[in-house]
Amino acid sequence: MSSRPVQDPVIGTALGDEVHPAFGVAVVTRRHGTGRSLFQSDLLHNETVSLSVHEATRGRDLNHDSVHPRRVLVEIEMSLSQWGSLVSSMGLGSGVPVTIRRTEHEPFVSEIPHQPRTAENLREVREVTDRMYARVKEATAALHEAIHAKKGVSATKEALRALENAVAHVGSNAQFAVDSLVEASEQVVAQARADIEAHVLEVVRLTGAGPSIEASLFDAPALPGTATS
């Protein structure tokens, strides 16, 4: 049983429309622009999907209800791939990143600067490789010093172990950073492909145009001993 109070709609407009705190309307629109930056997208988008939730009123005329959107409560914008993920991942994962454009308290939410996350991954790869190179260089210098200064077998072996340890960590640490960069790059490619496919499908829907290429139809050769009609 819900613990929420039950409240009847009341007449709340000059036209006699009913209002209620729970009355709402969701509106999905396709937007066209130039180079829009969206949250968690490395691309600049010319086409996006906007989802807005409005307060609503309900009127009654000629035996029919009419619902009217009113004040915007929240408006979000998504890339075509984010919209596809949203409608296809119901109940899965932790949600889909979206860009908040408007709230009931903030009619114009600030724009997001275009800062591709792949650049952050690339910076981290450079930091890891620079750090690993510095460790190997330091360990190599310590080994050279132990040998040329004749510090003895024990000091030389210790310096050699430090160098081997530094070299051993180079591969695993650098590989992890590179794998993260590759994964981020693959996500960008997947986003671009999803947006392109969605755009092409929308163009086909609007124009009724057929595909630009089509696989040829041909009869497969009959197998030996197979009767043909």
Image (spheres, rainbow, N blue to C red):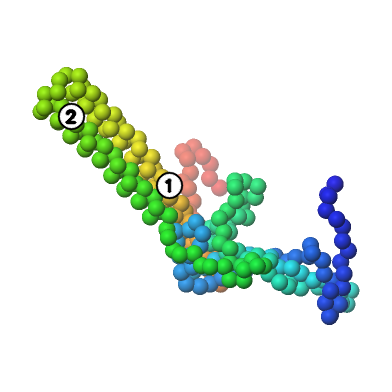
The residue at which mark 1 appears reads as 183
Rendering coords of residue 16 (x, y %): 86, 77
- First along the sequence among labels 1 and 2: 2
Rendering coords of residue 134 (x, y %): 25, 40
Q: Which residue is at a point 53% across and 68% down the rendered structure image?
A: 110
In this rendering, which labeled residue sits more in front, label 1 or label 2?
2
3 or 174, which lies in front?
A: 3
Residue 20 horizontal side relative to residue 79, left or right: right
Look at the image and tell me whether residue 96 can be seen.
yes
Look at the image and tell me whether residue 215 can be seen.
no
Q: CA distance from mark 1 to mark 2?
A: 37 Å
Q: Secondary structure at mark 1?
A: helix
Q: How many marks?
A: 2
Q: Residues within 10 Å of mark 2 (few under 14, many from 20)?
A: many
Rendering coords of residue 190 (x, y %): 47, 53
Indicate whether 222 appears above or below 59: above
Identify which amino acid the numbered label 2 is placed on. Answer: Leu
In which quarter of the view is residue 13 placed? bottom right
The residue at which mark 2 appears reads as 143
Determine the residue located farthest toward the bottom in the rendered image.
14
Indicate whether 192 appears above or below 91: below
Q: Secondary structure at mark 2?
A: helix
Q: Which residue is at a point 41% across and 45% down the rendered structure image?
A: 180
Rendering coords of residue 86 (x, y %): 60, 55
Q: Which residue is at a point 36% across and 44% down the rendered structure image?
A: 178
Q: Are dots 1 and 2 in contact, CB under 8 Å?
A: no
Q: Residues within 10 Å of mark 1 (few under 14, many from 20)?
A: some
